[in-house]
Image (cartoon, rainbow, N blue to C red):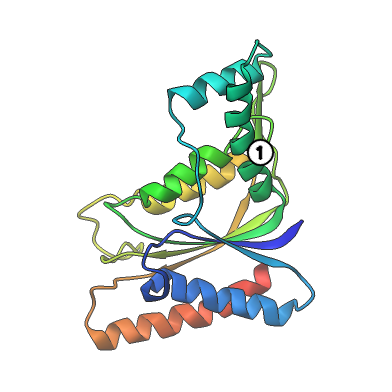
Amino acid sequence: MTDLLYISASPSQHDSHSGAVARELVSAYRELHPSRSVATVDVWDLDLPEFDATMIAAKFAVLRSQDATDAQRAQWARAVRLSEAFNQAQCYVFSLPMWNYGVPYRLKHYIDVVTLPGQNWSWSRAEGYRPLLQGKRAVLVYSSAGDFSPEAPKPYEDFQKPYMRQWLRFIGVEVVDEIAVAPTLADPERLAQVKAATARRARHAASLL
């Protein structure tokens, strides 16, 4: 079991605005809970199976108890192992930049692989969809070039934050805080103020996990 799983979705690594704030949060969490375990997943370094026609065929062959081939079972087992590693965490920290008003494709790929029926959600005719990860918590650290705060003008839609909220709610994870490092295209003085303020908020958010 992992107490805190930090999932990084920026390929920029140490140049990432969201990553820097998330690492501040993880550092504060370690200080608050020195005996708890912390693991990091960089979605750009993972060997993610393609969720293609082969994977979909394997999924339904296994779930419907059909005569799945050995190759199909092996392919499905890869996804299950990644899902189980995600599910075993007690709380989560995500850092992700906005890409084209949404999330990086590599994070979407990771989400598609780990979000599995019977692992973190279920469905029945009587109950419909049911989340299986109730009681777990998450903090989301975003970055974006533009300002998508509630008080800012909205010339374009923000699909980054609603997507993450909806996905985590679907599997039962409560979002206890959201921290937006934005706008990163601000002048250097304002950006420095934003980074300092979000770093302070990140240290507080560590106490919520």
Q: Which residue is the extreme one toward the front? A: 70
Residue 92 lies in what quarter of the image? Answer: bottom right
Q: Which residue is the extreme one toward the top? A: 67
Taking the spot 36% from the left edge, 75% from the top edge, the residue there is 15
Taking the spot 59% from the left edge, 72% from the top edge, the residue there is 205
Q: Nearer the viewer, residue 3 or 161?
A: 3
Instruction: Measuring from the top left, give residue 180's x and y in whole percent.
Output: 41, 67
Q: Which residue is the extreme one toward the right? A: 35
Badge count: 1
Picture quarter with the N terminus: bottom right
Picture quarter with the C terminus: bottom right
Q: Residues within 10 Å of mark 1 (few under 14, many from 20)?
A: many
Q: Does residue 58 sit above or below 198 in this rendering?
A: above
Which residue, given by chain and number where applicable, does mark 1 sit on? 120
Q: Does residue 145 sit above or below 28 in this rendering?
A: above
Dot 1: what SS? loop
Q: Nearer the viewer, residue 155 or 35?
A: 35
Left or right of 177 on screen, residue 147: left
Left or right of 5 on screen, residue 19: left
Q: Does residue 82 sit above or below 23 in this rendering?
A: above
Q: Does residue 73 sit above or below 203 in this rendering?
A: above
Instruction: Measuring from the top left, give residue 88's x and y in whole percent.
Output: 72, 50
Left or right of 118 on screen, residue 53: left
Instruction: Measuring from the top left, give residue 165's x and y in whole percent.
Output: 50, 49
